[in-house]
């Protein structure tokens, strides 16, 4: 499967501080790729380099095999971009703003714009300055989608959208994938990423710390476990296991997070009298919290 995005030792420094450091990432064609991290982790910096709003201090970023610094004109024809800090002209209507963007690109498919507006429940006749944050976000999404780009770069795309419109957005992105296209989503809404994405990369303090298929992330997610036992030695034994995290003991109840082979845990537990045990598999959010705890 051919690569749509290739980042090689990508680094961006701001004076004495570093925005991102030696990012290496390959995003194949036809995937929906999530990019997760807390505020300030380097997500927006990476996105800005991809669309050549920022220049890297070191390393390279390529889209469709072209360097983002030297081949930006060629690349921009094939991508749709939604910035996290998108700005629109409040004096224009939604339709006028989209026509302006279309004129800049040299293409404007009115029928498809109207189709997207209907799906996202966007009234394009209203002045942008009268719109809520969510309705402005819809204009931004239509702008990114309206020329049917091969690659979507979306920074917090569902910010301000209500749940029903989020579902419509998800359906549009899935259709985009079915057509053989690629989407790179930076988001902090973990449930959205888990539902929509095939693959996810985690960034922390400017460094890529994990990069796995979403199925593998779910498989490796920690367990939330509660054990009830009259034998206090069990809790003491479990606390010594390196896989046991964030434990809390109260009378006969011992609750904890477990990261590792559940079989190993059950082998230990089986040696003690148990009154009750509850085991819940974590999700992407619990994995996220495990990655980003101090």
Image (cartoon, rainbow, N blue to C red):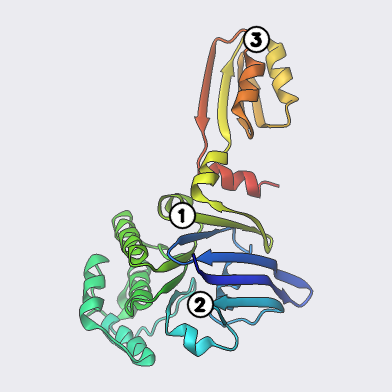
3D distance between C-alphas at marks 1 and 3: 41 Å
Q: Residues within 10 Å of mark 1 (few under 14, many from 20)?
A: some
Q: How many marks?
A: 3
Dot 2 and dot 3 residues touching (CB under 8 Å)? no
Residue 249 at x, y percent in the picture: 65, 21
Res. 235 visible in picture: yes
Q: Which mark is residue 260?
A: none
Q: Residue at x 68, y 15 (%)?
A: 234
Question: Cα distance, mark 1 to mark 2?
Answer: 20 Å
Callout 1–callout 2 Cβ contact below 8 Å: no
Instruction: Say few, some or many: other residues with alpha carbon within 10 Å of mark 2 (under 14 / 14 to 19 / 20 or more).
Output: some
Q: Earlier in the sequence, mark 1 or mark 2?
A: 2
Residue placed farthest to the right in the image?
Answer: 16
Check the image and report above or below for 205 versus 73.
Answer: above
Residue identifier under label 1: 198
Residue 64 location, x and y as percent? 51, 77
- Dividing the picture into quadrants, the one containing residue 67 is bottom right
Q: Residues within 10 Å of mark 3 (few under 14, many from 20)?
A: some
Does residue 147 sit above or below 201 in this rendering? below
Q: Is residue 264 left or right of residue 122?
A: right
Q: Secondary structure at mark 2?
A: loop
Mark seen at residue 64: 2
Q: Nearer the viewer, mark 1 or mark 3?
A: 1
CB atoms at circles 1 and 3 under 8 Å apart? no
Q: Position of residue 40 (x, y in %)?
A: 63, 64
Label 3, on which residue?
272
Residue positioned 58% across, 36% down in the render: 222
């Amino acid at each position: 499967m051919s690569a749509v995005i290739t980042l090689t030792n990508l680094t961006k420094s701001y004076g004495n501080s570093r925005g991102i450091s030696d990012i290496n990432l390959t995003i194949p064609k036809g995937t929906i790729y999530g990019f997760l991290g807390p505020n300030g982790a380097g997500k927006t910096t990476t996105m800005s380099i991809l669309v050549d709003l920022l220049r890297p201090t070191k390393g390279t970023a390529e889209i469709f095999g072209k360097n983002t610094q030297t081949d930006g004109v060629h690349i921009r024809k094939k991508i749709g971009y939604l910035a996290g800090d998108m700005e629109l002209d409040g004096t224009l209507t939604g339709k006028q703003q989209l026509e302006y963007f279309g004129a800049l690109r040299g293409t404007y498919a009115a029928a498809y714009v109207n189709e997207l507006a209907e799906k996202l429940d966007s009234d394009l006749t209203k002045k942008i300055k009268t719109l809520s944050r969510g309705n402005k976000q819809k204009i931004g999404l239509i702008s990114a989608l309206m020329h049917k780009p091969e690659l979507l770069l979306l920074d917090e795309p569902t910010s301000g959208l209500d749940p029903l419109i989020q579902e419509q957005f998800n359906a549009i992105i899935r259709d985009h994938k079915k057509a053989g296209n690629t989407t790179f989503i930076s988001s902090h809404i973990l449930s959205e990423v888990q539902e929509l994405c095939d693959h996810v990369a985690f960034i922390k303090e400017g460094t890529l710390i994990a990069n796995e298929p979403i199925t593998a992330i779910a498989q490796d997610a920690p367990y939330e476990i509660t054990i009830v036992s009259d034998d206090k030695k069990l809790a003491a034994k479990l606390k010594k296991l390196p896989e046991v995290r964030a434990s809390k003991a109260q009378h006969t109840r011992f609750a904890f997070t477990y990261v590792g082979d559940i079989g190993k845990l059950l082998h230990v537990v089986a040696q003690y009298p148990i009154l009750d045990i509850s085991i819940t598999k974590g999700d992407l959010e619990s994995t996220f919290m495990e990655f980003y705890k101090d």
